[in-house]
Image (cartoon, rainbow, N blue to C red):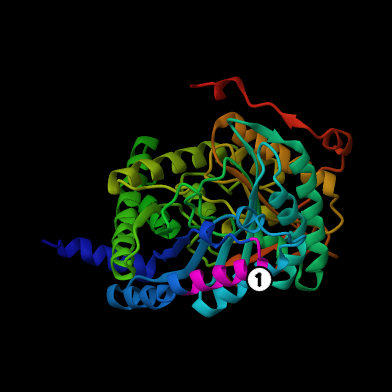
């Protein structure tokens, strides 16, 4: 039996506290699209995506209308293209990216992820070609997202790949310079990448996943912030319990949508990712949650501890609400997509170094950070290496999505628009790490990787 008060609270969460389903993402395997003839392979890719995801947007819109729950994005993730395309003799995979883009437009989804390579221990032929293709692929497509996994707790850090990705990011920035280097906003570099992440730009369909699957990503920073307003001045025990209860409610809604989408599309339900994903809108900020705990501004001493509490409580509340919680599940801290983070950067409270410390306890890493356009590839590689080390040592997912914006300097602001928001250009260290990056090779996995 439905509880009248609970229904009213849920309606209030949606209408006033910006609760939403951030994405319904359909994962599709493309391993059966491998063919030595690249034209045939790409035709198979297009046909499979457009067939499997033909009704994805329509179903998402019908659920949204029927239940009154905003579903912001409908997306697709596919098998890493480096695995699919390497059966061909192609020396560039840009045409594969264009095929993905065409399929995304045909199905009506916002983004398609999976122009990806997994190179945490080394390269295959397909990995080399795909990574070389990334700058042009992201410059010539609209909805394609790319990711490269360069490290894991089991294998260590592939420093050759780290060095290369610094150059790839710089090249992507240059090729999309006329659009404020927007291509870099669709490119993520991972340590410990997960196979069932529904969020872009890092989503790909892992080889251990079913042929097709529905994964749902929920959101709701505003709901958590409002809940914490009722326990001002109380102990952190009360804060943690409040967040857990709120995360439980949010995840329940996500599971409802996931089950409905799964049933109507006749596709298996995979996971609910209960990550708190902010938007540039006022009232939908992770930073404001942390400030509600008693910080004058996000970035002040205590910020990392507050974020650790938030991340842990979200996970604990979510796992009580669903048996299939996955993806990243926690709190995201993308600077350009969070109005509170933007303000904290502008007032000098939040620096790149403080953000790096916060990534030790959040769900992802250095996300949507705009850098000066003249930032060197080696400096970007150094930042990637630092984040990969945090992920490797702490056995957690970390990621880097940096945007060296062509022609911009510290003090400037860049407008990306939509959910990508706007970002102040943040300063980076003036000291060089080029000799460190040029060493290459592999940083070995930590001793705790030997758990078998």
Q: From the image, give the main secondary structure of the stretch colored magenta.
A: helix
Question: On the picture, is 15 further left or further right than 286?
Answer: left
- Disc 1 crowd, CA 10 A, few/some/many (<14, 14-19, 20+): few
Q: Quadrant of the N terminus?
A: bottom left
Q: Position of residue 137 (x, y in %)?
A: 72, 66
Dot 1 falls on a residue whose secondary structure is helix
Residue 253 in which image quadrant:
bottom left
Q: Is residue 179 visible?
A: yes
Asked if the stretch drawn in magenta spans residue 98, the answer is no
Find the magenta span and give its range. Answer: 36-50
Count the marks.
1
- Give x and y (percent) for residue 333: 57, 51
Q: Which residue is mark 1?
A: 39
Nearest the viewer among 144 and 419 is 144
Q: Is residue 278 visible?
A: no
Specify the quadrant of the image occupied by residue 341: bottom right
Which residue is rendered at x = 82% and y = 51% of the image? 167
Q: Residue furthest front?
A: 36
Is 154 rendered above or below residue 10?
above
Q: Residue at x 45, y 74 (%)?
A: 51
- Check residue 38 for magenta coloring: yes
Viewed as shown, does residue 249 lie left or right of 347?
left
Q: Quadrant of residue 156?
A: top right
Q: Residue at x 34, y 48 (%)?
A: 324
Q: Is residue 253 left or right of residue 391?
A: left
Residue 437 screen position, x and y as percent: 83, 37
Query: What residue is rendered at 57% in x and 40% in y?
Result: 192
Residue 304, percent across and down? Answer: 56, 38
């Amino acid at each position: 039996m439905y509880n009248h008060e609970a229904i009213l609270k849920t309606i209030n969460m949606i209408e006033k506290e910006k609760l939403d389903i951030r994405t319904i993402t359909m994962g599709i395997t493309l391993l059966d699209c491998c063919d030595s003839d690249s034209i045939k392979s790409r035709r198979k890719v297009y046909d499979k995506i457009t067939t499997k995801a033909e009704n994805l947007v329509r179903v998402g819109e019908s659920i949204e209308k029927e239940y009154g729950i905003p579903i912001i994005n409908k997306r697709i993730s596919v098998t890493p293209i480096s695995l699919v395309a390497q059966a061909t003799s192609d020396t560039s995979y840009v045409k594969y990216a264009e095929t993905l883009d065409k399929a995304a437009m045909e199905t009506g989804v916002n983004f398609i992820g999976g122009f990806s390579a997994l190179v945490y221990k080394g390269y295959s032929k397909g990995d080399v070609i795909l990574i070389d293709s990334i700058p042009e692929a992201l410059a010539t497509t609209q909805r394609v997202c790319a990711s490269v996994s360069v490290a894991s707790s089991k294998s260590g850090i592939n420093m050759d790949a780290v060095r290369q990705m610094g150059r790839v990011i710089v090249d992507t920035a240059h090729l999309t310079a006329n659009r404020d280097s927007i291509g870099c906003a669709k490119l993520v570099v991972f340590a410990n990448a997960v196979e069932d992440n529904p969020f872009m730009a890092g989503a790909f369909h892992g080889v251990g996943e079913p042929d097709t699957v529905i994964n749902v990503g929920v959101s709701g920073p505003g709901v958590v912030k409002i809940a914490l307003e009722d326990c001002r001045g109380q102990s952190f025990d009360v804060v943690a319990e409040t967040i857990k209860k709120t995360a439980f409610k949010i995840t329940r809604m996500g599971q409802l949508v996931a089950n409905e989408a799964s049933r109507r599309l006749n596709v298996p339900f995979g996971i609910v990712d209960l990550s708190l994903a902010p938007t540039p809108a006022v009232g939908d900020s992770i930073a404001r949650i942390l400030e509600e705990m008693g910080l004058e501004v996000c970035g002040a001493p205590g910020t990392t501890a507050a974020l650790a509490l938030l991340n842990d409580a979200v996970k604990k509340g979510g796992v009580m609400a669903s048996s299939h919680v996955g993806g990243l599940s926690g709190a995201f801290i993308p600077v350009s997509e969070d109005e509170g983070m933007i303000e904290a950067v502008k007032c000098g409270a939040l620096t790149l170094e403080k953000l790096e410390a916060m990534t030790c306890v959040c769900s992802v890493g250095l996300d949507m950070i705009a850098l000066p356009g003249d930032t060197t590839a080696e400096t970007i590689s150094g930042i990637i290496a630092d984040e990969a080390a945090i992920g490797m040592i702490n056995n957690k997912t970390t990621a880097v999505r940096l945007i060296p914006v062509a022609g911009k300097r510290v003090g400037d602001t860049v407008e990306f628009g939509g959910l990508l928001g706007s970002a102040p250009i943040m300063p980076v260290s003036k000291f060089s790490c080029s000799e460190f990056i040029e060493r290459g090779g592999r940083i070995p996995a930590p001793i705790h990787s030997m758990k078998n």
